[in-house]
Amino acid sequence: MTIKRSYVLATVIALVLGVWILSGQFGTTTDSANGDEAGLPGGTADGAGLTEDAAEIQSVRARVFEARPVSRDIIIRGRTEPVRAVEVRAETSGTVTKLPVEKGEYVSRGDLLCGLSVNARGARLAEAKALREQRWLQYDASQKLAAKGHRSETQAAADKAAYDAAVAQVRQMEVEMSYTRIKAPFDGVLDDRFVEIGDFLSVSQPCATVVDLDPILVVGQVSERDVDKLSMGSVGKARLISGKTLEGVVRFIAKTAEQETRTFRVELAVPNKDNSLPAGITAEIIVAAEAVTAHLMSPAFLVLNDKGAIGVRTVGADNIATFQEVSILEDSNDGVWVGGLPEKATVITVGQEFVRDGQPVDVTMESDGVQS
């Protein structure tokens, strides 16, 4: 559906209002003429209070319309977002010495983003490894002596504890060394970089931002009236501002409404393996929420009643015109889908602007017959 429901409704209202006003002007002219001829304002010559227009039967054309099921789409305005976006931060301090990836490039999990200077960490790691070897020799000797009864179990346990502490010290230094290599946490795109070679990074300062764009999310807010018509895992479509339409799956529906708007967040996941679809562009989520029974007809058949309600003029077996209020559900290239009519309805298609509710009419059925 390329035209939004609100635009269609506004166009229909403007159209029928114009016809309504014009028809009122013609009626006033006719009534005035009749009044002038009779010598009474708006009356007949005999003063009975009935105009000739009220007494005459209006000729109209009509057509039988038959309802049929149609899927009603829920359209949610939103934007594209990455499925994940992370600012990768430093876990140790140091000077930036390596920046192997440029902004916009694809990275795999574990790829180096920012390299920091090692400084004295290498020497401290070598020292910790040497101490670990020494503690191992002491512990090994204690085990052998204790087995022969030449060393107490308490001393052997103390040597074991000293060795375990040396092992932990080596592990701690290895982790500290690994922090000098800031790596990509997942496959994605390097969306931004905050440092250059020579900059000094402190703990928790950001190095770069990595975004995951596959799948990409189309995110919007659905009204509380329509949220119960959506379901997780249902197939939907994303219509981009460029007009391109992509298929996706509803992966998230919020259980709590936004306090200010009373709307619920909805996420549609769309495949984006080549990362061609960027985040942040305007898009619409289109989900077929329910099947309803409706009639398809031209918007030219719609009229307004005295209260300004939109509807159509129908006729029954007694050939009496009746106003039937309708609701516009959807718009299509073939017309508008309206609800509120019985399964089969004989709708006046020509002359409906000049007919009043309850007025007898002379009906000529159009040759198209039943429209379904």
Image (cartoon, rainbow, N blue to C red):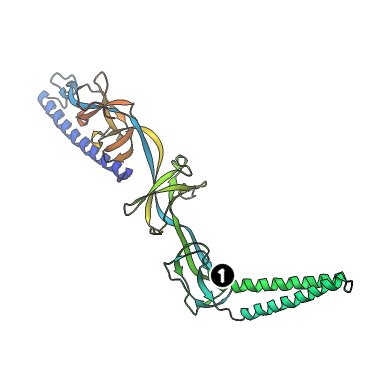
Q: Which residue is mark 1?
A: 204
Task: Find residue 135 and report its horizontal and vertical position in percent.
Answer: 76, 76
Q: Nearer the viewer, residue 81 or 104?
A: 104
Task: Find residue 50 and report its horizontal and vertical position in percent.
Answer: 19, 21
Q: Nearer the viewer, residue 156 or 208?
A: 156
Residue 43: name its quadrant.
Answer: top left
- Amino acid type of the residue tagged 1 in the rendering: Ser
Task: Find residue 97 and report its horizontal and vertical position in percent.
Answer: 51, 78
Residue 264 visible = no
Q: Nearer the viewer, residue 232 or 326?
A: 232
Q: Is residue 49 left or right of residue 72?
A: left
Q: Is residue 177 left or right of residue 357?
A: right
Q: Residue at x 21, y 39 (%)?
A: 18
Indicate the quadrant containing the C terminus: top left, top right, bottom left or bottom right: top left
Query: From this viewpoint, which residue is outermost toward the left?
Result: 37
Indicate the quadrant containing the N terminus: top left, top right, bottom left or bottom right: top left
Residue 102 visible = yes
